[in-house]
Image: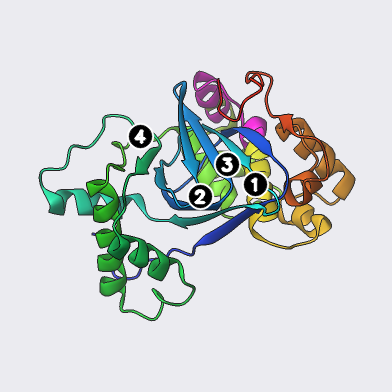
Amino acid sequence: MLDDVFRIPTRALIRQGGRACFFRLVNTSPLLIQVQSGTKIVMADDKALRLEAGDYALLPDYRPLTMENIPKAPQKYQTLALPVPRQLFEDAYIAMGSIAVPSRPLPASASNLPEEAAALFAYCCQPGNLTRLPGAIAKARLMELITWFALCGAVLGRCESPRLEDRLRQMIESDTAFDWTLGHAARAFNMSEATLRRKLAAEKTSFSEILSDTRMNRALALIQTTTLPMAQVALEVGYDSPSQFSARFKERFGVNPRHVRGGTERFERIGAEVEHSGADALP
């Protein structure tokens, strides 16, 4: 089990005004989600999972996902997301005994989630409910919720060997506004800059790519879950210039950050690797 002193998960309410598809998003914690309005399409390994309003699902950690969020006028797209530590999933599955854990972590829907389980999800997402409980009770509630999801078909796949990239993302995510350098990262991992550069190259990435991508992932989350002004969002992810931030965001995601909130621009498909099919579903 986790240590008695563990960080209580805080739910995120994700809102989006404009339709957009975001390529290669990485969660650093597994997410239990409920789509509340609009449609969400999640793609991994060329398999698309379509979720409509009222549907529940589990999204894995450290797995690049393509996510398309589609508002249904006159409402914005909205999803409730609860990040839960991976260890709680593993503890819950051990307690269940006979659960079949997939070999790979993939998005999975929780079909026909009972009213009791839906009520527990709403309880865990309500601000303050879990923090008022003793740590052991809060963990028990979350493990019960994980068990309900598993019984309805949403089981978190086995943890793959952690990549250096994943550890680096976690470090940068702890303070995306910090002026991170290759030297900071090398010292944090007790290796030389040359060794770190070589190990990242073996994973087909680089420090600058991971730094930029982690910041843009964080910026997208802030835009979707807060009402912070864009200039403040830029500062939160290490950009003093809002215009430079906006340009980098559009380069990464294909849309202006204001489109994500307000939907004032035309829909654009994000990432050259993904072609628009003329339908809601991804090809």
Please give the residue where the numbered disc 2 appears in the rendered image: 53
Please give the residue where the numbered disc 3 appears in the rendered image: 185
Question: Is tag 4's residue or tag 2's residue first in the polypeptide sequence?
Answer: 2
Question: Is tag 4's residue or tag 3's residue first in the polypeptide sequence?
Answer: 4
Please give the residue where the numbered disc 1 appears in the rendered image: 72
From mark 1 to mark 4, how far is it between C-alphas? 29 Å
Question: Is tag 3's residue or tag 1's residue first in the polypeptide sequence?
Answer: 1
Residue visible at 38% across and 62% down in the picture: 121
Q: Is residue 195 left or right of residue 180?
A: left
Please give the residue where the numbered disc 4 appears in the rendered image: 105
Q: Is residue 130 left or right of residue 265?
A: left
Residue visible at 39% across and 81% down in the picture: 132
From mark 4 to mark 2, how far is it between C-alphas? 24 Å
From mark 3 to mark 1, how far is it between C-alphas? 43 Å
Q: Classify 10 Å Cα crowding around label 2: few (below 14), some (14-19), many (20 and above).
A: some
Q: Is the magenta stretch mostly helix, strand or loop?
A: helix
Which range of residues does the magenta coloring cover? 196-210
Residue 22, position in %: x, y?
Answer: 63, 35
Question: Which residue type does callout 4 highlight?
Answer: Pro
Q: Which colour scheme is used?
A: rainbow
Q: Quadrant of residue 217?
A: top right
Question: Is tag 1's residue or tag 4's residue first in the polypeptide sequence?
Answer: 1
Question: Which residue type does callout 2 highlight?
Answer: Ala
Q: What element carries label 1?
A: loop
